[in-house]
Image: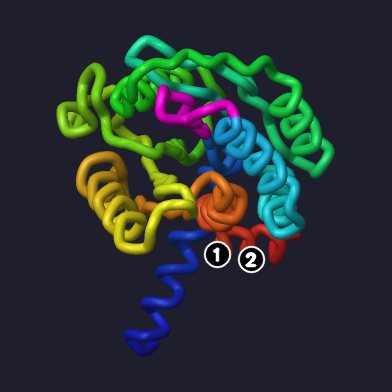
């Protein structure tokens, strides 16, 4: 057997073992979504963020990604964050197996009371809040935190201070940078987005395959979140094995 073929079979075997681990875990991914409601986010922007997430969750490609392996589903939790001790759960952990589950999440998002804390920006605190939520949540094969934000940490421990914190071990943190509003001038807008993306890349995201997505203002939040969810949830190798085995 050639080295190329041996490598292929090794990959298939590893994927098969991974699929077995998924089945034992009961869910393939625990996904927590953290939404920024710090003082820099006004009521209009918060509404765009919530509605954008609701619509992104119900977009057909995202629904398909959630439904692709219903026996090994994704568990979802959504919360708002601002200051170090200011976090609020909008959607407790829910196991998503179908579009109906996502409709229920979108309904919950739209109906949840809007709390304007006016607090500072505590990205580190938001990450630690999610870490506790993962401890209390379902035992899934992967744990992913999706942190959206329009600014840098200015309250509590910085993300850099948590780089080696064991409470975040095993959690992949991805970022969704919300850039300057479309009303900003070109050079100013580009400079703000570039600086914030670099900050998230260097300090916020962590774990194998972690990445940063960009929304061009809160008006672009829905599209950016849709791209981000697809990248986080899609598991083409495991999906092919799963469907081939049925």
Closest to the observer, 197 or 131: 197
Closest to the observer, 1 or 226: 226
Residue at the image point whose x is 49% and y is 39% from the top: 141
- Please rate how many residues cluster around mark 2, counting C-alpha atoms within 10 Å: few if below 14, some from 14 to 19, many from 20: few
Determine which residue is flagged by label 2.
Answer: 240
Residue 68 in sight in this render: yes
In the current view of this chain or complex, which residue is farthest to the bottom?
Answer: 2
Closest to the observer, 14 or 160: 160
| Proximity of marks 2 and 1: CB atoms separated by less than 8 Å | yes
Coloured how?
A: rainbow
Q: Give the range drawn in magenta.
A: 32-43
Quarter occupied by residue 173 = top left
Q: Is residue 243 left or right of residue 159?
A: right
Q: In this view, does 5 lie to the left or right of 61?
A: left
Residue 77 in sight in this render: no
Closest to the observer, 16 or 237: 237
Residue at the image point whose x is 36% and y is 89% from the top: 2
On the image, the x and y values in percent for residue 91 come to 64, 23
Q: How many marks?
A: 2
């Amino acid at each position: 057997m050639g080295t190329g073929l041996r490598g292929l079979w090794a990959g298939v075997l590893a994927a098969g073992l991974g699929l077995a681990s998924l089945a034992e875990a009961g869910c393939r991914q625990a996904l927590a979504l953290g939404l920024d409601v710090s003082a820099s986010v006004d009521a209009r922007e918060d509404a765009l963020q919530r509605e954008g997430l609701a619509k992104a969750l119900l977009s057909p490609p995202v629904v398909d990604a959630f439904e692709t392996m219903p026996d090994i589903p994704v568990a979802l939790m959504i919360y708002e964050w601002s200051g170090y001790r200011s976090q609020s759960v909008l959607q407790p952990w829910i196991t998503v197996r179908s579009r109906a589950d996502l409709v229920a999440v979108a309904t919950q998002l739209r109906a949840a009371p809007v709390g304007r804390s006016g607090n500072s920006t505590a990205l580190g605190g938001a990450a630690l809040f999610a870490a506790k939520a993962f401890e209390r949540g379902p035992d899934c094969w992967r744990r992913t935190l999706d942190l959206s934000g329009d600014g840098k940490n200015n309250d509590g421990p910085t993300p850099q201070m948590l780089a080696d914190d064991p409470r975040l071990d095993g959690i992949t943190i991805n970022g969704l940078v919300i850039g300057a509003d479309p009303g900003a001038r070109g050079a100013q807008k580009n400079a703000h987005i570039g600086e914030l993306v670099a900050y998230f890349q260097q300090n916020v995201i962590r774990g194998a395959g972690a990445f940063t997505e960009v929304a061009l203002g809160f008006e672009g939040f829905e599209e950016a979140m849709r791209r981000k969810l697809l990248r986080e949830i899609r598991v083409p190798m495991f999906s092919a094995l799963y469907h081939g085995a049925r």
